[in-house]
Structure formats: structure tokens, C-alpha cells
């Protein structure tokens, strides 16, 4: 397993994984635009030459908003998400971030368990945050 910065040549595969896993996926162009911003961190996990997962975070002076997390279905339940997010949090800390937040569908019990294992705590709910299907988001934070 190799975790590295996302590159432009990863975007087709990232977009494919995104489209297969989300009802309202980001476009390839949205990822490309995010890669070009120095206030974002985007990582991919490579296993046997394939993109197994990716994640991204928007940085502000003391806060990191994690806005993309996905592991391809072929690579789930192998620790990919945990390793990838640990590295993302580490990179945020290296840039001076002391608090991290994300939203997750309240029905996504696997993601909730992963985030809790990483130290995130539930601090609220955004009612009807998601569409397709309409669902609440759990707001989670790590505050150091």
C-alpha cells in the first residue's frame, strides 16, 4: 500500500470510483480544480498499481474540512481508509491544523465507526444535508 499526493493523471480513476460510490459525485473537473489550490490536500492510496482510495481536505488557518473520502469497493475492509485518513490528518497537522471536521450520512455505520476509531466525535446533525436519498449528516470533529 502506497499513500501519496493525488496527481492529475489519477483523476480519471478517481472520478470513476467517485461515480460508482456516490449518488451526487464530484466531477473530474471539480477534483482537478481542487488539486490546483495550495489550501487543499488530496491523497490517493495505490495497491498493485491501482487507485484503491482517495481523500481530500480543505485547509483554513486552524481547521481542516475533510470533504472527500472513498475506498473502492474492491479494497474495503483492508484498513485502506484508516491508513489513508491517518496520513491526511498527519499532513494537516504538519500544516498547523489543530481541528478537523467532516460530515457523514447518519446511515453510514462503517464510516462512522472508522471516524470514531480515528478520534472523531459527533457534535451535531445537519438535517436533510444529503440528497438522493434525502438524509441527515452527522457532524464530527477532532479538536486537539
Image (spheres, rainbow, N blue to C red):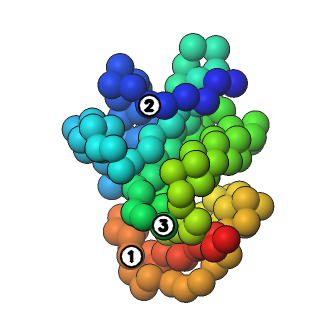
Taking 44 as reference, is 88 above or below it? below
Q: Name the residue rendered at 57%, 14% in the picture.
A: 49
Which dot, 1 or 3, sits closer to the camera? 3
For residue 22, side relative to residue 116 (left or right): left
Please state the horizontal and vertical placement of residue 52, each as a whole percent of the image. Answer: 58, 30
Which dot, 2 or 3, sits closer to the camera? 3
Please state the horizontal and vertical placement of residue 140, each as a whole percent of the image. Answer: 58, 73
Q: Name the residue rendered at 58%, 48% in the picture.
A: 94
Secondary structure at badge 2 equals loop
Q: Going from the N terminus, do you reach mark 2 or mark 3 first?
A: 2
Name the residue beneath numbered marker 2: 6
Residue 85 seen in the figure? no
Question: In this orientation, which residue lies closer to the viewer: 11 or 86?
Answer: 86
Name the residue beneath numbered marker 3: 63
Q: Going from the N terminus, do you reach mark 1 or mark 3 first?
A: 3
Question: In this orientation, which residue lies closer to the viewer: 106 or 6?
Answer: 6
For residue 85, side relative to residue 79 (left or right): left
Within-10-Å neighbours for mark 1: few <14, some 14–19, many 20+:
some
Name the residue beneath numbered marker 1: 129
For residue 77, side relative to residue 31 (left or right): right
Please state the horizontal and vertical placement of residue 99, each as a whole percent of the image. Answer: 57, 68
Amino acid at each position: 500500500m502506497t499513500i501519496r499526493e493525488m496527481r492529475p493523471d489519477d483523476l480519471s480513476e478517481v472520478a470513476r470510483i467517485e461515480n460508482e460510490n456516490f449518488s451526487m459525485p464530484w466531477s473530474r473537473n471539480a477534483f482537478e480544480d481542487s488539486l490546483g489550490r495550495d489550501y487543499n490536500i488530496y491523497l490517493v492510496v495505490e495497491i498493485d498499481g491501482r487507485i484503491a482510495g482517495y481523500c481530500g481536505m480543505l485547509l483554513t488557518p486552524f481547521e481542516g474540512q475533510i470533504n472527500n473520502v472513498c475506498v473502492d469497493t474492491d479494497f474495503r475492509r483492508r484498513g485502506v481508509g484508516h491508513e489513508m485518513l491517518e496520513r491526511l490528518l498527519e499532513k494537516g497537522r504538519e500544516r498547523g491544523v489543530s481541528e478537523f471536521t467532516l460530515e457523514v450520512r447518519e446511515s453510514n455505520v462503517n464510516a462512522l465507526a472508522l471516524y470514531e476509531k480515528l478520534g472523531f466525535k459527533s457534535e451535531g446533525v445537519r438535517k436533510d444535508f444529503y440528497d438522493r436519498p434525502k438524509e441527515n449528516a452527522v457532524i464530527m470533529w477532532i479538536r486537539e
